[in-house]
Image: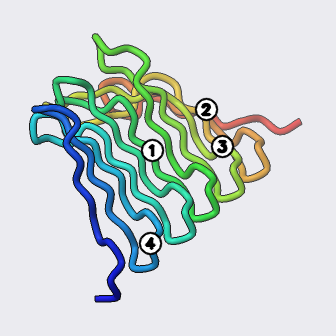
Amino acid sequence: ENGQLERKFQPISSNRGTMTVYYSDGTIRSEIEYFKNQVMVWKDYYPNGNLELWEEYDKSLDYYLIYNFYFMNGNPESTLTIIDKKEKVYNSTEYYINGNVKAKGKKEWHPSLGGYINAGNWTYYTIDGLITHTETYLHGKLVETSEEEED
C-alpha cells in the first residue's frame, strides 16, 4: 500500500532460489532459501532487525541441521544443532532472556516417537547459572532425576 517492496524472489539456478520478505518500513522480515521448490533455510527477523528464527534442513530435507529461536533482545531462546548426522543426534540448549543457560542436553530425531526427543543427561540451571538438577532420559522418557546438593 505504501509503495514499499513487500517481497522479492531471485532464482539462483534451475533448482535453487531465494526470497526476501520485508516489513512495511523496508526492514527485512524473512529470508528464505529454496531447493527443488522446498525450503532449505528460513530466517525470520523481529521489526528491530534482530533474528527471531533460524531453521535449516539437510540436503534431503528430512531433518533439521539447525533450529534456533531468539528473544527480541537478540539473545538465543533455544538452539538445536546437529552433532551426529547418521544417528540424528543434536545439542539442545534453552536460555533465559538474560542469555544464561536454562537447560542443556541432547535430543534425537525419532519420527516414530513424535519427533525430537530428549536423550541422555540433561542439566538444568537457575537464572544465575547455578545447577538445580539433572535428568536422564532413555528413548524420550525420564528415567532418573538428581537434585543438586547445597553446600
Viewer-nearest of labels 4 and 2? 4
Q: Residue at left 22%, top 24%? A: 59
Q: CA distance from mark 1 to mark 3?
A: 14 Å
Pick whichever, 132 or 11, lies toward us. 11
Looking at the picture, how far across and down is residue 144, in whole percent? 49, 29
Q: Is 77 rendered above or below residue 34?
A: below
Name the quadrant of the N terminus: bottom left
Q: Residue at left 60%, top 34%? A: 123
The three-letter code of the residue at mark 1 reads Asn
Graded by Cα atoms within 10 Å as few (under 14), some (14 to 19) or many (20 or more), the crowding at tag 1 reads many
Q: Give the mark nearest the N terminus, 1 or 3.
A: 1
User: Label 3, on which residue?
Assistant: 101
User: Label 2, on which residue?
Assistant: 146
Do the residues under discs 4 and 1 have CB atoms within 8 angstroms?
no
User: Label 1, on which residue?
Assistant: 68
Q: CA distance from mark 4 to mark 1?
A: 24 Å
User: Label 4, on which residue?
Assistant: 26
Q: Residue at left 33%, top 26%? A: 108
